[in-house]
Image: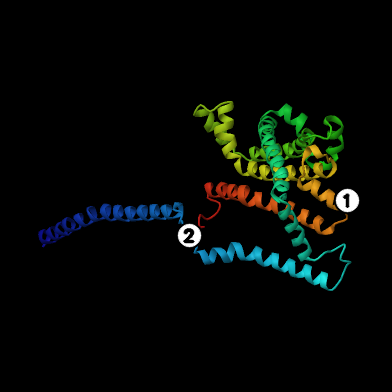
Amino acid sequence: MASTETGTDGAEAAAAAPLDKTPAPAAEAGVRGGDLSGLEAGLDALETVTVERSPLGRLLVQKVLPPVVAIVLVLVAWQVAYTLKLTPSYKLPSPRSVASALGDLWDQGILFSVIWTSVERGLLGFVVAVLIGTPLGLLVARVKVVRAAIGPILTGLQSLPSVAWVPAAVIWLGITSSAMYAVILLGAVPSIANGLVAGIDQVPPLYLRAGRTMGARGVRSAWFVLLPAALPGYTAGLKQGWAFSWRSLMAAELIASSPDLGLGLGQFLENARTNSDMSQVLLAILMILAVGIAIDLIVFSPLERWVLRSRGLTARSQ
């Protein structure tokens, strides 16, 4: 009996041994493999950006219809105020009178020349402001002594109304294009520099250390590390710099008038005020507004969308 029981115990042990050894590692490997593949699939799904094209009808409804409706509502309210005679007509002419003034400029053949005279000055002054404000912003952001000396001055200049520079520029440079460009630069350069400084201040120090490890130092570090990393803040500074350029130019054209300077939008507005022609005054205001909106839509809105998309901060659907 003893031998029989001993043989039975040995057989049970021998039968149990293979069950304990072989299945467990294979099962665990299969589970781990499934978990890893699922994790990788999830990460791929997170990193994958779905590019979708919105139908033309939806694009029109979302992008075009709202501003058109807003313009129509403003025109309706304007016409109602004129019809009800809420104010004398010489103070608030009808939309038709303003449209007639626009037609007169078209018939005279000076509409586009008036607009282009100001746009050319504004864009040229803005480009020069970018060329000055960008290295100045880098210098202020990276050199502590320069930041302590110039940083508060840049902030003060940014808050100073551009029109305050016009009398000084006229005295220094006379009623010339140089005076207008000086006013543009004094208004735009601080905004561009401060925007770049704000962007650089938000760059993680790890980026700079990584750049130095890969050999990016000095100018190469600024070009390949700082500027790309600070692009969101820099873009905001550029947009604000253009706004200051345009406002500064209008202030200069309103005050400094001369036949040698040509007829720009600001001078056209001043002439309309002198003649007490409210239709032309409103037309000049609307044209100045239209140019500002057009530059934003053509240049800065696409630039902002590109910056956000390159950082995965907005959808890529169009």
Residue nearest the observer in this picture, 240 or 95? 95
The percent coordinates of residue 294 (x first, y second) are: 66, 52
Q: Amino acid at mark 2?
A: Arg
Residue 156 seen in the current view: no
Number of numbered discs overlaid on the protein picture: 2
The percent coordinates of residue 45 (x first, y second) are: 43, 55
The percent coordinates of residue 307 (x first, y second) are: 57, 46
Q: Is residue 311 found left or right of 179 in the rendered image?
A: left
Density class for disc 2 (Cα within 10 Å; few <14, some 14-19, many ≥20) is: few
Residue nearest the observer in this picture, 284 or 15? 284
Q: Which mark is residue 235?
A: none
Q: Indicate the secondary structure of the residue bearing disc 1.
A: helix
Q: Is residue 126 found left or right of 83 in the rendered image?
A: left
Q: Amino acid at mark 1?
A: Thr
The percent coordinates of residue 285 (x first, y second) are: 77, 54
Q: Quadrant of the N terminus?
A: bottom left
Residue found farthest to the bottom: 84
| Residue for point 68% across, 53% down | 293
Q: Is residue 66 found left or right of 75 in the rendered image?
A: left
| Residue for point 73% across, 31% down | 147
Q: Which mark is residue 53?
A: 2
The answer to which quarter of the image holds residue 193 is: top right
Residue 99 seen in the current view: yes
Q: Is residue 206 found left or right of 254 in the rendered image?
A: left
Q: Which residue is mark 1?
A: 274
